[in-house]
Image (spheres, rainbow, N blue to C red):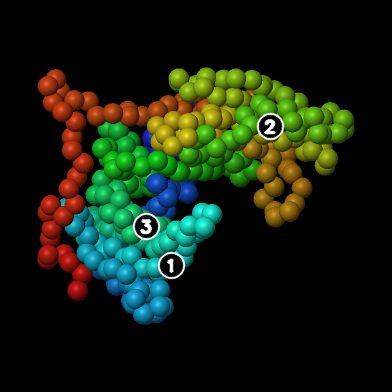
Amino acid sequence: MTEKMKSVCVGRFLVDVPANAAVMLSREMMDGYTIVTVEEIEMAFRERITARGAAIQSPGSAVDGTGGMVEASDLHVPGMIGRKFVFGRNRGYLMEGDRRIDDEDVSVEVHGHTGGMSFSLSMKNADVADADLAEGLLARLRRRGEDEVPTGPGFCIWRGFFVEPLPAHATEHIVMHIGLPRHPDVGIAFASLPGGGTTRSLLKRVKDMDAEAGADEMLRVTKLRTGKRHINDLSGEEVLERVRELNFATTFGFVWETEGVKYNPLKPFLSLELHSGISLEPAARPADSSLHEDAVLALWDMISSSIRMRPTSLPLPAGHSPLPEPKLGAIANPGNAFP
């Protein structure tokens, strides 16, 4: 299974997985914007986005009290057609002591299409100014082949790549799910999420759970490996367990985590998990692992040891200053505008 591996770009990291593994990316977000990618032709995109605009507009305008459209405009991103919607204005206020502070939020959607791929960024409870950030992020998005690994710095999503330099932002989310042919009971996931949010480390959580577990339960759990583990300059903690379930099935649960730093996309919280012996039936009892212990350990070590960060900065020739951020609207294409 591990004789032939392939590298997968996940956010700002590369992870090697078996070449025949099925890979899916989910929970793709950047600075609060949910990212959705659709493979479709331009005509289908135009029809879908026109219908979306009409659906948003149908409750009425944002000024007549029905919370409809605030703004609808064409994107001005070179090489990309699309629309930006700001809608659902919601006004309220907060009280700080005797002082009233007015508050207002909207929903924002930015949809772009280029070369057979459509990318959408959306956020509820956003500021009106956030729409400019969404368009700025979309201006740095490039299409990516299914197995393409970019060489420059940036953030990989499914079939796309946010190229540095990106507009300033604080958070990034992405999760990779790995499935293995002929081993449906084995589930593997790698997550890169905003760091600094955990109050207890992996080892502390496991220690606390062990302290609360009964003697019978602890007799069924064998720690195969536990402790701190550094992987390619990434400091983390690891717990590998074999469990003898109540129905006498043998299962495995492996976890490796890093803590990360809050509001630092280059130092996210990382988590790699492998579970073997997952039942295929809902609410059914655990099943015997289809992989022997030696095979599970070999697979885990091969995947986990490959986790490494991609380049984080652009190489600059001597005497050159950093590249400026893109200027939106610098190249407008009226011929591609929506009617």
Name the one closer to the observer, 329 or 143: 329
Q: Quadrant of residue 152?
A: top left
Which residue is tagged 2?
205
Mark 1 or mark 2: name the one nearer the start of the chain.
1
Disc marking residue 127: 3
Task: Tell me, yes or no, whether the two marked residues, 1 and 2, touch with CB atoms within 8 Å.
Answer: no
User: Where does residue 328 sit, x and y in percent of width and height?
Assistant: 19, 52
- The disc placed on residue 229 is none
- Secondary structure beneath disc 2? helix
Camera-near label (2 vs 3) is: 3
Q: Can residue 114 be seen in this snapshot?
A: yes
In this rendering, the answer to whether 68 lies above or below 157 is below
Looking at the picture, which amino acid does disc 1 mark? Asn
Looking at the figure, which quarter contains the C terminus? bottom left
Mark 1–mark 2 Cα distance, whole angstroms, equals 40 Å
**Front-most of residues 226 and 263:** 263
Asked which secondary structure carries label 1, the reply is: strand
Name the residue located 24 percent from the left edge and 55 percent from the top edge. 114
Mark 2 to mark 3 CA distance (whole Å):
37 Å
Say left or right for 315 vs 229: left
Q: CA distance from mark 1 to mark 3?
A: 10 Å
Image point 16% across, 55% down: which residue?
Answer: 329
- Image quadrant of residue 62? bottom left
Left or right? Give the position of 191 relative to 83.
right
- Name the foreground residue: 31 vs 183: 31
Cβ atoms at labels 1 and 3 below 8 Å apart? no
- Circle 1 residue: 90
